Image (cartoon, rainbow, N blue to C red):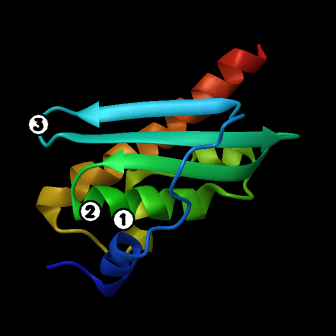
């Protein structure tokens, strides 16, 4: 059902936790499945220097959160903004169709954190 990459990111999630002095935070949730994701960014000179996440949800939600943080770190805000739910699922070698909403949440949480950073900076 799940790919090896999904299982790896679920069993060994990367970048779990909080950033105390985060300058961008995004939180999204899906009431239909109960998944909640929160992403913390540390941005310097328009580049994402650190990313952490806290997710309450299924294995796919944890795996997509882990993957999106791996994909975003080191990117400019504009590059990270372009990360889509399809890109997250593709990086995990696919997700079952009934779990695609989890990749939507991961990309959405990242976008919310970027939006929060930009609002705080303005």
Taking the spot 12% from the left edge, 58% from the top edge, the residue there is: 98
Label 1 sits on a secondary structure element that is helix
Residue that sits furthest to the right in the current view: 45
Compare residues 76 and 69 and report the one nearer the observer.
Answer: 69
Dot 3 alpha-carbon crowd within 10 angstroms: few under 14, some 14 to 19, many 20 or more: few
In the picture, measured across the screen, residue 5 lies left or right of residue 24, that is left
- Horizontally, residue 106 falls left or right of residue 26, namely left
User: How far across and how far down the image is residue 7, in percent?
Assistant: 30, 79
| Residue found at x 67% / y 27% | 117
64 relative position to 78: left or right? left
On the image, the x and y values in percent for residue 75 come to 72, 55
**Dot 1 and dot 2 residues touching (CB under 8 Å):** yes
Q: Quadrant of the C terminus?
A: top right
Label placed on residue 32? 3
- Return the mark for residue 60: 2
Q: Position of residue 99 (x, y in %)?
A: 18, 58
Mark 3 → mark 2, Cα distance in angstroms: 15 Å
Residue for badge 1:
63
């Amino acid at each position: 059902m799940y790919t090896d990459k999904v299982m790896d990111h679920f069993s060994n999630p990367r970048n779990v936790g909080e950033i105390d002095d985060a300058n961008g935070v995004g939180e999204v949730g899906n009431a239909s499945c109960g998944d909640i994701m929160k992403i913390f960014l540390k941005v310097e000179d328009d580049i994402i220097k650190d990313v952490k996440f806290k997710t309450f949800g299924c294995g796919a939600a944890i795996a997509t959160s882990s993957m999106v943080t791996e994909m975003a770190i080191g990117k400019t805000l504009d590059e990270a903004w372009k990360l889509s739910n399809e890109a997250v699922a593709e990086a995990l070698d696919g997700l079952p169709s009934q779990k695609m909403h989890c990749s939507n949440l991961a990309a959405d949480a990242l976008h919310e954190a970027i939006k929060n950073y930009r609002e705080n900076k303005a």
